[in-house]
Image: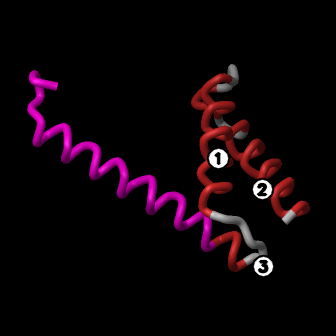
Amino acid sequence: MRAIGYLRALGVMVISGCYWLLHLSVLFFVVKILGGQVGWTALVLIQLVSMTTGHLSMSPGGAGVTDAAALFRLSFFWKYL
């Protein structure tokens, strides 16, 4: 942390947090527009698991795998909520 400074590290964390908040809010509003009800906690877990499966897949950049995993998990939550 000393190499980049505390203020710069804090700035990076704030920008990263704002990015993920924007990213998840877009997903939240898309689900709302489609008529579903999914909580923020479920969306964070869906996004976390989907991004993890995309990183673990053998496709370049997780292309398609992340989207398929997110759709599968959203449909699962949509059915049981």
Q: Residues within 10 Å of mark 1 (few under 14, many from 20)?
A: few
Picture residue at 45% right of the left edge, 53% below the top = 20
The stretch in magenta equals 1-29
Residue 57 percent coordinates (x, y) = 69, 24
Q: Nearer the viewer, residue 39 or 27?
A: 39
| Residue that numbered label 2 is attached to | 74
Instruction: Point out the image quarter for the C terminus.
Output: bottom right
For mark 3, does the 10 Å Cα neighbourhood hold few (<14), some (14 to 19), or many (20 or more) residues?
A: few
Q: Which dot, 1 or 3, sits closer to the camera?
A: 1
Distance between the alpha carbons at the discs numbered 3 and 2:
12 Å
Against 47, residue 39 (above or below) is below
In the displayed structure image, the side of residue 74 where residue 39 appears, left or right: left
> Disc 1 vs disc 2: which is toward the camera?
1
Q: Is residue 9 above or below residue 22?
A: above
The residue singled out by tag 3 in the image is: 35
Q: CA distance from mark 1 to mark 2?
A: 10 Å
Label 3 sits on what residue type? Answer: Gly
Question: Which residue position holds label 1?
Answer: 45
